[in-house]
Amino acid sequence: MNKPDLIEKTQEKNNKRKNKIRFYYSFLTIVLLICLVQIGISAFNNITKSISYHGKIKKMKALNQQAYAENQRLKEELEDFSSLKSLEAIARNNLKMAGEDEVLVIINKPQPAADSSDDNIKNVKHKTQKTQKVQKAQKPQKQKI
């Protein structure tokens, strides 16, 4: 065997080994780059979700405070309506009721004239119903002595 053939063979082996090592390092570099990209995407997604959740938490806290304030207002309103004076005021204003020593007077306001005959019929019926209510309300009440 010749010495140059042996040198060429060893150089070929070394080149093959170097090529394998280069391929191995290149493959590892690509895998690591893919891992780094994946970690970066995951971190970005986590940060955006975190920001989104913080915004939702703030909205929910504000909504909770509004609901609490509304609840307190409704509780106070309930306490106000449960008193006897407020019940009497509601009966007088909304239900057209009167107390024992009071006389209820309902004043009819004139309705604007309508053009169609159907509206006139409705207005006449409505006015007669109101006058019947007024007549019932104007009946003398028994007075307690």
Image: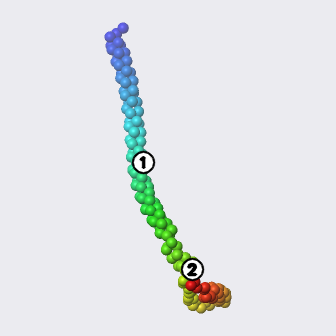
Tell me, yes or no, whether the two marked residues, 1 and 2, touch with CB atoms within 8 Å: no
> Which quadrant is the C terminus positioned in?
bottom right
Q: What percent of the width, then of the height, locates residue 99? A: 55, 80
Kindly identify which residue carries mark 2.
97
Q: Residues within 10 Å of mark 1 (few under 14, many from 20)?
A: few
Q: Amino acid at mark 2?
A: Met
Residue placed farthest to the top in the image? 1
Marker disc for residue 82? none
Q: Secondary structure at mark 2?
A: loop
- What residue lies at 35% left-to-right and 12% top-to-bottom? 6
Indicate whether 117 appears above or below 73.
below
- From the viewer's perspective, is 1 left or right of 103? left
Indicate the quadrant where residue 121 lies: bottom right
- Label whose residue precedes the other's in the sequence (1 or 2): 1
Hey, which residue is sitting farthest front in the picture? 145
Which numbered dot is residue 49? 1
Give the x, y percent position of residue 39.
Answer: 39, 39
Q: Is residue 140 left or right of residue 12?
A: right
Q: Where is residue 42 drawn, in percent x and y?
A: 41, 42
Residue 48 lies left or right of residue 93; in this view the side is: left
- Where disc 1 sits, the SS reads helix
| Percent x, y of residue 141 | 60, 86
Q: Amino acid at mark 1?
A: Lys
**99, above or below 120, in the image:** above
Q: Nearer the viewer, residue 100 or 128?
A: 100
**Crowd around label 2: few <14 · some 14–19 · many ≥20 (10 Å):** some
Does residue 41 lie above or below 24 as drawn?
below
- Residue at the image point whose x is 43% and y is 62% from the top: 69
